[in-house]
Image (cartoon, rainbow, N blue to C red):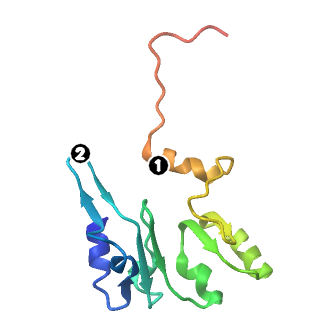
Amino acid sequence: MNNMIEDGIQSPAVTEVTAQYRNGDRLIQRERCDYLRPTVLHVSDVDDDMANTEFMFPFVSVTQCPQDQMLRKIGPTLVGTAITNDEAWSRQLVDARHIDRLNVGAVPTCALNWLQPHEGNIIDFLYRNRAFQNSLPPAH
């Protein structure tokens, strides 16, 4: 992931906003594990690849896009947040089936509601279901 971000920020349309606030590199390598620090990118061209990139760690790309093009431009997404008072736009977002989790308003991405179906998807993504038996099941 870090290499993909490093490649992406070479674009003249991309500015890594968090770099100026971070003391050190994004990638931290330790003896037992490596981790990535949160990353915010500003992307001035909505058609740049980094404008529509998602990773499974605190990463976000921020760009401007005309509202009438936005649903088409973002494509499938794990989490979409809309800070808006436009009720018609909110209804369009609710109807958009390619946004797995939709936050309307100032709802932090990390504010999870385990009753929402999307929140279990990370477990489905990381772990495979498996059945195990070591004897015949009981008769019905």
Q: Mark 1: few, some, or many residues within 10 Å (few <14, many ≥20)?
A: few
Figure quadrant of residue 112: bottom right
Question: x, y percentage for residue 57?
Answer: 42, 60
**Amino acid type, mark 2:** Arg
Q: Residue 89 got which mark?
A: none
Question: x, y percentage for residue 105?
Answer: 69, 72
Where disc 2 sits, the SS reads loop
The residue positioned 60% from the left and 83% from the top of the image is 70
In the rendered image of this protein, does residue 60 appear above or below residue 130? below
Q: In which quarter of the image is the N terminus?
A: bottom left
Extreme-right residue of the structure: 87
Q: Residue 125 got which mark?
A: 1
Q: Residue 32 got which mark?
A: 2
User: Which of these two is toward me, 5 or 131?
Assistant: 5
Question: x, y percentage for residue 56?
Answer: 43, 59
Q: Mark 2: few, some, or many residues within 10 Å (few <14, many ≥20)?
A: few
Q: Earlier in the sequence, mark 2 or mark 1?
A: 2
The residue positioned 43% from the left and 73% from the top of the image is 53
Horizontal side of 21 relative to 110 (left or right) equals: left
Where disc 1 sits, the SS reads helix
Figure quadrant of residue 4: bottom left
